[in-house]
Image: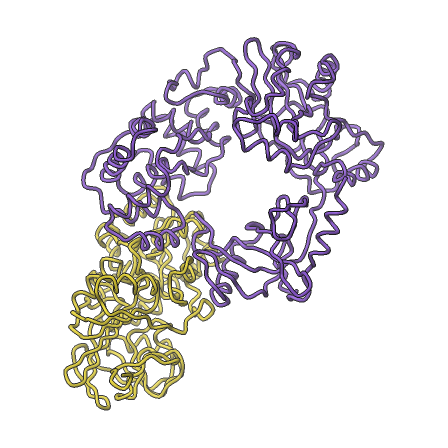
Chain colours: A purple, B yellow
Amino acid sequence: MKRFAELFAALDTTTSTAARTKALAEYFRTAPEADRVWTVALLSGRRPKRVVNATELRNWAAEAAGLPLWLFEESYNVAGDLAETIALLLPPATTDADPTLDQALRQLIQLAGQPEPIRKQATLAAWAQLQGDARLLYTKLITGGFRMGVAQGLMTRALAQATGVEETTLAHRLMGDWKPETTGFHALIEGDGQQGARPYPFALASPLEAEPETLGPVTDWLAEWKWDGIRGQIIARPGAFAVWSRGEDLITDRFPEFAALADFLPPGTVIDGEILAWDGVAPLPFAALQTRITRKTVSKAQMAKAPAHILAYDLLEDAGEDIRQQPLAHRRARLATILAQIPPSLPLSLSPQITAQDWPELTAERAKARDKQAEGLMLKRLSSPYHQGRKRGDWWKWKLDPYAVDAVMLYAQAGHGRRANLYTDYTFAVRDGNDLVPFTKAYSGLTDAEFNQITAWVNRNTLERFGPVRRVKPELVFEIGFEGIQASPRHKSGLALRFPRMLRWRQDKALDQIDTLESLRALLAGTKP
Amino acid sequence: MARDNLLTFTDKGIFCPEGGFYIDPWRPVDRALITHGHSDHARPGHNRYLSTDKAAPVIRARLGDITIDTIPYGETRAIGGVNVTFHPAGHVPGSAQIAVERGGEVWVVSGDYKVENDGLSEAFAPVPCHTFISECTFGLPLFRWQPQAAITADITDWWAKNRAEGRISIISAYSLGKAQRLMAMLGHQGPILTHGAVTHMTDILRDQGYNLPPTIHVTPDITHKTHPGALVVAPGSALGTPWAKRFGDAAEATASGWMALRGIRRRRGATTGFALSDHADWPGLNQAIRATGAERVFVTHGYTAPFRRWLSEQGYDAGIIETAYHGDDAQDPDFMLPEIPPGGAGGGQPPVATET
């Protein structure tokens, strides 16, 4: 664990991409091979399942530290991170053992399903032999909350530097359903020659901030709706059918309606598309899809209420051949041909192309996005290959401007991790007659300096405390932006926002200038199909 | 009951009715006893000041034209109907705890203190008393300092690594106390350059006879080219300014007890943090309180609510003294500290800006 802790410390104390890549590449060259495999797994989101819950951890740690639970909780509120709290509160290590990452994780995995006394004894024993960052990391692995702040692209680049395997090849090999327990380092980076159900790295778009005219002739571009669903990849290869989400989760079983596609798609087909809840001809709001994603198994009733459908964007593999380097125009034509040959009753169709003579016409089309349940337009250069990850220039997301309302802060809560000790999570209200009605929470969009300033303000203007939450004087006004609005009987305001965030702290506005619940309801009425 | 109390707690600060003086008051008063020169303790505007002879030069330098009387450590002076003695607090050079005695009953105001002997400040000595008023800036068990020797080794390694890469090392530290402590810890290893604010305080302490290694004041002609691999000691407010740019691609670190928390370290932009504090850590606070033999303890400055509760559970008669400090008058921009600990800890006062 010490070698892994050193890597962590090296990554934690620099923001320089070059320095971080160098530290990782060095690790991938020199750490024990089994540890390298685990590190790749952890940095690509393949975390071990949680074997101890947070309550157990708290109780065991407080007991081992000889502290009352309330004092543990006070400490946690200040540190803002459970694993860090535990690492700091436990007494110093009693031995100086240094298990490898592989040993520590294998031992951890074996604890799954064991009775509490066994898990407790093993956890206390591990804590007693680890110190500092190693103890922090081990505890983060137990909680399932392990993150190292390393983007997968950076990890892949470092691995490419360390192994000499080309980066794009490596990125593809690291995708899919491999298990660190049973995969050797060389098998992982050299591949097994089998495609199986392995997906390709997703191409990602950048937000278009300039005027669209800067992109050249409109005819160079494919425009389509930016759907608000789950980006997914359908793999139909001989003997393998899978649906992957962009987060590399295998979600085949959550959408049984897609199983039939295996019988109709030509062998060796990989499609990039958007999974949506579907009313037969058009998408349902995202909230309908949400009822489907959270569940591992899905009932008949849920399937009937929110049937899933895929709108296809792109074709990555055609008759078993990787065609990602072909121009989009070609891939799209092949996609259309394949989709034209499957029965129209299947839940898969082409995401329609929006055609326009010029940019003003396309801009006018874009304005209709909300009526289509879309967030805006996607612009993709017709001559472009299917890139790996985000590569500026060929793919743009051209979203509608968000909705915006002015609202007052009612409650503030401290954040976690980097935001521990800072009040960053707020609840906002709009006016309803003489009342203030809370309608959303938001915790992003401000600068660190603003969060500092607001934290000082919260300290002076707290009216009431509820555990970590503070009710504050209704005085600070913020412009809240959001992408969509829906009726919601579960919320006091009767509505729920999609992607709410703070656009701006309106220091120029006072409480009597905030928006009303009525104006939000009017937005809601306006968005109904 | 209040009449019997040697010290009372007012909106101007801690007051001794029989002595007619305040201790570290935050609003102008006639007579102020000052524990040390940090700006949240030594405030301007009082008619008369009393401090240790060791603390007075800094206080004078910071507050300008004031009427200040001095007293050596350990000497007892009668003021009104009480006897007052200043004892070393180990916080920064010249810092004191103030003992107030009347008819055998002793109250001690700790000021800021740390129990580890840093080799520069006069070492903390516990003062037996009946009532102890203790700071608790780091009054949570999260805070446990490494011994100074271990931190010295860590900083030494960091400096050596940067030097080997041909880079300057800039360490941010409070200009009174922490900066000089770093010099004393590291001064024999190579040239130390100082920012103006640090130079000013260092010169005063050096003139008083504190044993500080030679340092070089950063003048406009000094850069990473003239002093490659040097260590620069500067207040936090100097980092990221045009002043700091002269040192090229320098490595930056912060020396503060708050660096024990990763969230705070990361908020400072992934610079290196050394958890070096001039305040008592959790074991230090508990040890100091036990050593006084006091039965009654008032806590102030810091995580007061949980610390008071903890002391009550340990059998002390414990209370909280509210202070007037809020984030806004954290006068020294040296340090952006967390304000009140969230989650109901603390009694309304932030750990103020002078933590170092």
**A93, above or below A464, in the image:** above
Q: Quadrant of the C terminus of chain B?
A: bottom left
Which of the pair A355/B250 is nearer the observer?
A355
Please tell me in which quadrant of the rendered image residue A357 appears: top right
> At x 40% / y 51%, what residue is drawn?
B224
What is the x, y in percent for residue B206?
Answer: 26, 69
Quadrant location, the N terminus of chain B: bottom left
Residue plotted at (44% across, 31% down): A43
Q: Residue A14: where, in percent of width, then height? A: 42, 43
| Residue B30 percent across, percent down from the top left | 35, 88
Q: Is residue B266 left or right of residue B19?
A: right
Residue lying at 71% horizontally and 28% vertically, measured from the top left: A381
Percent position (x, y) of residue B314? 22, 62
Figure check: A166 above or below A92: above
- Report whether residue A213 is seen: no
In this image, A108 relative to A282: left or right? left
Q: In the image, is residue B252 above or below residue A529?
A: below
